[in-house]
């Protein structure tokens, strides 16, 4: 009897233990099944960039830097941290020179606030700038061109090239000719300034040292040569040109030039060596091609043109090889895109555009990542 009792007792305790284990398992299971699901990962709010255009595949993360007025010709400092540009905005009757950070902050007047200014650029040290101004010819803005002669640009003979500290102080005059001296840019090595002048009776390109010395004429073809920039290796120069091909066109050009005017309806992109040799034409479409700038690879040029608009009013940016092949359209906005420049590291493109303006014809500065 004792053995039987022990056996049943052992079975009893085993059943109790198994029941307890099953009970514990049964209690745990529902808690596992009923645990709340982890919260979903936050969904990033990716609103489309209103400035982006799907066909503009080379431009990423486009940002607008100015808002209102007429802003153009924004050029990077050599360290890529600043931009210098010309603007007509509230408080100025015509273009003055401003600087700003590349994010659009700290916009500051650095020209005199007198006369009309154009074509500004940083020197390589980052502490000095150059620009052209008419202020020595008068404090007021010079008269606008007479558009009864058609679409013309004014070539004010009071334009001279000046250098100054980056805050506008220490203004010094570099050119002293009684002529149009403007459209100045600086070579990447910081040694040379290239500019346009009609001091010889025609519009030609000249180079000089950054202190204004050693002036050298680079072009000598009847017609307009201007808007020049050096290649990244300082060995070449890209520019825009309008060379009359017949006697009638040449006389029309010369008559306008005597009135300090030019009709820029037909401009072609040209390239030459830095000493003025080996001048060659890159575009040949008879349209208004202007504002050329070398790509960082030194083998292509970006420029603005109205070649795809039958009315000639809409300008877009294009890229082309140095031999004139490989033309590719970059922008597709239905207004104006122009004055492109790459940052020193080649990662950013700054340009002027009428896109996203609050008023018709308003021109602002935009910056974008350059996507190859």
Image: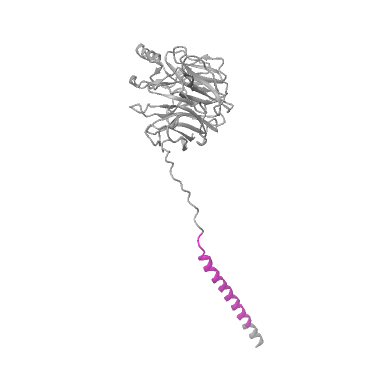
In this rendering, the answer to whether 276 lies above or below 39 is: above
In this view, the residue farthest toward the right is 2
Q: Give the extent of the magenta segment.
A: 9-37
Q: Position of residue 347 (x, y in %)?
A: 52, 34
In this view, the residue farthest toward the front is 139
Number of numbered discs present?
Answer: 0
Within the image, what quadrant is residue 241 found in?
A: top left
SS assignment for the magenta stretch, majority: helix
Within the image, what quadrant is residue 255 found in?
A: top left
Q: Position of residue 37 (x, y in %)?
A: 50, 60
Asked if residue 74 can be seen in this view, the reply is no
Within the image, what quadrant is residue 19 found in?
A: bottom right
Q: Does residue 208 appear to the left or right of 87 in the view shown?
A: right
Asked if residue 119 can be seen in this view, the reply is yes
Residue 252 within the magenta-colored segment of the rendering:
no
Which quadrant of the figure contains the N terminus?
Answer: bottom right
Q: Residue 233 or 247: which is nearer the viewer?
A: 247
Residue 12 within the magenta-colored segment of the rendering:
yes
Q: Residue 29 or 158: which is nearer the viewer?
A: 158
> How are the colours assigned in the image?
one colour
Q: Position of residue 169 (x, y in %)?
A: 56, 26
Q: Position of residue 50 (x, y in %)?
A: 42, 40
Q: Does residue 31 appear to the left or right of 51 in the view shown?
A: right
């Amino acid at each position: 009897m004792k053995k039987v009792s022990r056996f049943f007792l052992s079975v009893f305790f085993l059943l109790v233990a198994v029941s307890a284990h099953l009970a514990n398992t049964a209690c745990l299971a529902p808690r596992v099944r009923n645990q709340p699901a982890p919260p979903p990962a936050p969904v990033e709010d990716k609103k489309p960039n209103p400035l982006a255009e799907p066909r503009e595949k080379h431009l990423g993360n486009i940002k607008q830097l100015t808002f209102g007025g007429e802003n153009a010709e924004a050029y990077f400092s050599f360290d890529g941290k600043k931009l210098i540009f010309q603007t007509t905005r509230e408080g100025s009757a015509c273009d003055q020179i401003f600087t700003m950070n590349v994010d659009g902050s700290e916009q500051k007047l650095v020209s005199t606030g007198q006369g009309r200014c154009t074509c500004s650029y940083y020197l390589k040290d980052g502490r000095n700038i150059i620009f052209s101004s008419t202020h020595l010819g008068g404090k007021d803005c010079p008269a606008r061109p007479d558009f009864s002669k058609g679409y013309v640009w004014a070539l004010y003979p009071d334009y001279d090239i000046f250098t100054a500290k980056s805050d506008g102080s220490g203004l010094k005059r570099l050119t002293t000719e009684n002529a149009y001296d403007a459209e100045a840019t600086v070579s990447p090595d910081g040694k040379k300034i290239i500019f346009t002048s009609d001091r010889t009776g025609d519009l030609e390109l000249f180079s000089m040292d950054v202190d204004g010395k050693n002036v050298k004429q680079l072009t000598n073809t009847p017609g307009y040569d201007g808007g020049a920039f050096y290649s990244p290796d300082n060995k070449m120069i890209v520019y825009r040109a309008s060379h009359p091909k017949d006697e009638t066109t040449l006389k029309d050009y010369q008559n306008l030039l005597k009135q300090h005017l030019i009709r820029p309806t037909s401009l072609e992109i040209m390239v030459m060596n830095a000493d003025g040799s080996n001048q060659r034409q890159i575009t040949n479409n008879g349209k208004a091609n202007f504002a050329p700038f070398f790509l960082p690879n030194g083998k292509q040029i970006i420029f603005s043109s109205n070649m795809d608009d039958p009315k000639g009013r809409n300008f877009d940016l294009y890229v082309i090889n140095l031999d004139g092949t490989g033309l590719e359209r970059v922008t597709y906005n239905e207004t104006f895109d122009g004055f492109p420049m790459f940052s020193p590291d080649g990662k950013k493109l700054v340009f002027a555009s009428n896109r996203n303006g609050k008023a018709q014809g308003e021109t602002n500065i935009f910056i974008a990542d350059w996507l190859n």
